[in-house]
Image (cartoon, rainbow, N blue to C red):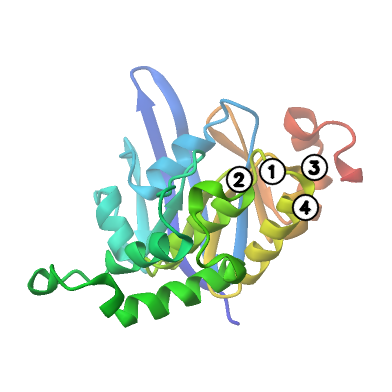
């Protein structure tokens, strides 16, 4: 697949009083590519992803999606446009089944006031779409499972399935592997590898093994600024990155 630029941030800065949480950050997300965003706590990663998703408004700089300026669009408008986001805390309906969770996400993209009283099981298009997204997220054997009783890793996969059901072309994933065991992390990495073939993915993550296993491009942030951006091998061998974040053993990761 030919990589296509979907989302571009140019010089985005976020000031809170006199504090620059992000300063002059440039970032590009391409279809067919997974872009990892790394940095120590307080580096500005969450602020960056918040500006991209519309949860925070840049103080300066621009954000373009499919060549259109979306800097002033809010989170809901960006979601409608095709930018999906997962958060550090899992955001699902625990009392519903996997299918019901994802079907609801699909329905959010095809609302029709005239059919407000139509039974959910009559919306076959939404069920079909949900089943497709559930399989993409690696949960085809858990369709009828109650979300609240699934493992933490499966719940994170469910959240990704819900984002996919909103027709997102860009996936902004905030620490999706946090709190997972090794087997769950491996499952998530496989899901991400498949999804990057058709989506543009920004991954904020602390699991270094997972990042270097799946990332095509890595951007490292320190003190709200981009320290370095490049291929995984470039980042591993960067003296500046090793000193600021990865540590002396980085090249052995």
Marks 3,1: beta carbons within 8 A: no
Q: Could you tell me which secondary element the residue under label 1 belongs to?
A: loop
Q: Earlier in the sequence, mark 3 or mark 4?
A: 4
Which residue: 92% across, 44% down?
252
| Circle 3 crowding by C-alpha within 10 Å: few under 14, some 14–19, many from 20 | some
Which label is found at residue 183?
Answer: 4
Q: Earlier in the sequence, mark 1 or mark 2?
A: 2
Which residue: 60% across, 54% down?
154
Q: Nearer the viewer, residue 202 or 139?
A: 139
Determine which residue is flagged by label 1.
180
Give the Cα separation between the discs numbered 4 and 1. Answer: 8 Å
Does 235 sit left or right of 140 as displayed? right
Determine which residue is flagged by label 2.
152
Give the Cα separation between the discs numbered 3 and 4. Answer: 30 Å
Q: Is residue 176 above or below residue 43?
A: below
Give the Cα separation between the discs numbered 3 and 1. Answer: 28 Å
Which of pointers 3 and 4 indicates the residue nearer the eye?
A: 4
Quarter of the image where the C terminus is located: top right
Q: Earlier in the sequence, mark 4 or mark 2?
A: 2
Determine which residue is flagged by label 3.
238
User: Could you say where residue 51 lies in the image, as x and y percent from the top left?
Assistant: 38, 43
Q: Nearer the viewer, residue 39 or 149?
A: 149
Q: Could you tell me which secondary element the residue under label 4 belongs to?
A: helix
Q: Is residue 135 above or below residue 228?
A: below
């Amino acid at each position: 697949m030919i990589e296509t630029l979907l989302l571009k941030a140019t010089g985005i800065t976020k000031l809170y009083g006199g504090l620059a949480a992000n300063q002059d950050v440039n970032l590009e997300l391409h279809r067919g590519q997974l872009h990892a965003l790394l940095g120590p706590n307080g580096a500005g990663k969450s602020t960056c992803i918040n500006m991209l998703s519309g949860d925070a408004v840049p103080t300066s700089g621009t954000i373009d999606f499919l060549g259109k300026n979306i800097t002033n669009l809010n989170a809901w408008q960006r979601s409608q446009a095709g930018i999906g986001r997962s958060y550090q805390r899992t955001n699902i309906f625990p009392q519903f089944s996997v299918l019901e969770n994802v079907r609801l996400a699909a329905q959010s993209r095809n609302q029709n006031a005239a059919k407000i009283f139509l039974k959910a099981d009559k919306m076959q298009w939404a069920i079909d779409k949900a089943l497709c997204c559930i399989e993409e997220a690696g949960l085809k054997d858990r369709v009828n499972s109650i979300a609240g009783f699934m493992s933490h890793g499966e719940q994170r996969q469910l959240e990704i399935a819900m984002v996919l059901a909103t027709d997102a072309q860009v996936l902004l994933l905030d620490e999706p592997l946090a709190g997972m065991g090794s087997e769950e992390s491996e499952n998530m990495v496989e899901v991400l590898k498949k999804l990057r073939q058709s989506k543009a993915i920004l991954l904020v993550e602390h699991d270094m093994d997972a990042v270097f296993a799946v990332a095509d491009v890595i951007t490292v942030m320190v003190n709200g600024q981009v320290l370095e951006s490049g291929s995984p091998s470039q980042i591993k061998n960067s003296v500046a990155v090793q000193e600021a974040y990865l540590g002396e053993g980085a090249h052995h990761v």
